[in-house]
Amino acid sequence: PDDYPTIQQAINAANPGDTIYVRAGTYYENVIVNQSVSLIGENRKTTIIDGSGDNFSVFISQNNVNMTGFKTKNAIWGIVLYNVSYCNIAENDVLDNDNGIELYSSSESNTISGNNMTNSFRGFWLYGSSNNTISGNTITKNDYEGISFYSSSNNTISENTITNSNYDSISIYGSSGNTISGNTITNSYHGIHLHDSSKFNTVSGNTITNNHFGIHLHGSSDLNTISGNTITNNYDGIYLDGSSNNTISGNNMTDNYHGVRFYGSSGNTISGNTITNTYH
């Protein structure tokens, strides 16, 4: 606030490529970022954008925006990226919203990394968005889903820690060509849930523990690959439900009630898995 009393006034006065440095404090604003700027908070714990229960705390509608070092809270959407590309949202705390971060119709090289998303209905939501990277985030204690996709393809979801989601840690609905790798997933109903998602989704190298379903393919067929995952202490390690022509290989499944279970599924390739200490 040294030069402008609000974040919005600083954005309105900025030129493309400017950096706006925001000192610690609580800003009761609904910030619209419609300039290609860098928005840098002094400290992610103490530089707070409070949406006051409104639609959003931060709404980004311009390409090439960088946002880091903020706590956003108390809105329907914590941070929204709307029809943008080449944005970087990193090292923020996003909490106590209906939904944490949303990418809506946003494709090409948006990066969401190193954020904490907690105590929301959904931690992270992609709708109609492709070719983005979501990595290294900590996503905890969300009422419904940790990360959710809808009609979103060719995204990379990697190295996130997702715990204590009441329904899905990662939910993929009507989406193809996504890569889900290296995530640590615990304590949800579904660890990873592919629902009506066919063709070239890859789920590999994840550690999935203490869920009802470790990995659940529901109505998801044709060239999805589930490989190299460590799946431990779930009711079903991997469950294929109405899902055909997928490849399940090289997974390590132990201490699950069922290792791999099928219902109404055919033509799948199951090879090279290690399955131990199961009831069935």
Image (cartoon, rainbow, N blue to C red):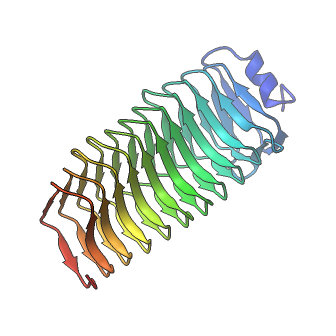
Residue 171 image offset from top left, x and y in percent: 46, 52
Residue 206 image offset from top left, x and y in percent: 34, 60
Q: Report the residue at 63% width, 35% height from top.
A: 80
Instruction: Farthest residue to the right: give it.
Output: 5
Out of 204 and 110, give the one closest to the viewer. Answer: 204
186 horizontally vs 203: left or right: right
The answer to which quarter of the image holds residue 81 is top right
Q: Report the residue at 68% width, 41% height from top.
A: 77
222 horizontally vs 57: left or right: left
Q: Report the residue at 31% width, 82% height from top.
A: 255
Position of the N terminus, as image quadrant, is: top right
Instruction: Farthest residue to the front: give it.
Output: 264
Position of the C terminus, as image quadrant, is: bottom left
264 horizontally vs 210: left or right: left
Out of 30 and 148, give the one closest to the viewer. Answer: 148
Q: Establish if 145 lies above or below 4.
A: below
The answer to which quarter of the image holds residue 264 is bottom left
Residue 149 image offset from top left, x and y in percent: 47, 43
Q: Report the residue at 67% width, 14% height from top.
A: 15
Q: Establish if 37 lies above or below 206.
A: above
Residue 88 image offset from top left, x and y in percent: 53, 34
Out of 96 and 90, give the one closest to the viewer. Answer: 96
